[in-house]
């Protein structure tokens, strides 16, 4: 059998920028729905509001994740075990 190759390093991506662009697109969609379409059915408005809310939640999540990774990187480089957080 052949030896297993090591896993590749994770790609560095711009998650914050991607989420901000997506959230901005939902804001534009909401403006279009409210100004141009003026729906009698409120569902399109709530879909846009949900997209904006999920985008803001995603932004908060990614920023907290990145902060945790930054905090744990010096400990890993120094050889210290990573502390467990609840």
Image (tube, rainbow, N blue to C red):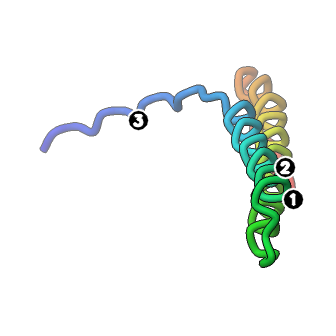
In this view, the mark in front (2 or 3):
2
Q: Quadrant of residue 3?
A: top left
Front residue of this view, candidates 16 and 74:
16
- Estimate the spatial distance between the alpha carbons at disc 2 and disc 3, rounded to whole Å: 32 Å
The crowding category of the residue bearing disc 1, from other C-alpha atoms within 10 Å (few below 14, some 14 to 19, many at least 20), is few
Q: Position of residue 35 (x, y in %)?
A: 84, 53
* In the rendered image, the vertical position of residue 63 relative to residue 52, given as above or below: above
Residue at image point 37% right, 33% down: 6
Do the numbered discs 1 and 2 sit on residues whose CB atoms are within 8 Å? no
Can you tell which mark lies on residue 20?
A: none
Q: Position of residue 63 (x, y in %)?
A: 82, 38
> In the rendered structure, which disc, 1 or 3, sits on the residue that comes first in sequence?
3
Residue at image point 12% right, 44% down: 1
Q: Quadrant of residue 23?
A: top right
Q: How many marks?
A: 3
Query: Mark 3 — residue?
Result: 7
Q: Is residue 11 left or right of residue 20?
A: left
User: Disc 1 on helix, strand or loop?
Assistant: loop
The crowding category of the residue bearing disc 3, from other C-alpha atoms within 10 Å (few below 14, some 14 to 19, many at least 20), is few
> In the rendered structure, which disc, 1 or 2, sits on the residue that comes first in sequence?
2
Query: Mark 1 — residue?
Result: 86
- Estimate the spatial distance between the alpha carbons at disc 1 and disc 2, rounded to whole Å: 23 Å
């Amino acid at each position: 059998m052949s030896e297993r190759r090591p896993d590749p390093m994770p790609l560095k991506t711009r998650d914050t920028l991607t989420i901000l662009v997506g959230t901005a697109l939902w804001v534009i969609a909401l403006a279009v729905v409210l100004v141009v379409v003026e729906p009698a059915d409120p569902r399109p408005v709530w879909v846009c509001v949900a997209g904006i809310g999920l985008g803001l939640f995603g932004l908060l999540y990614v920023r907290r994740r990145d902060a945790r990774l930054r905090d744990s990187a010096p400990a890993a480089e120094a050889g210290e075990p990573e502390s467990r957080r609840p």
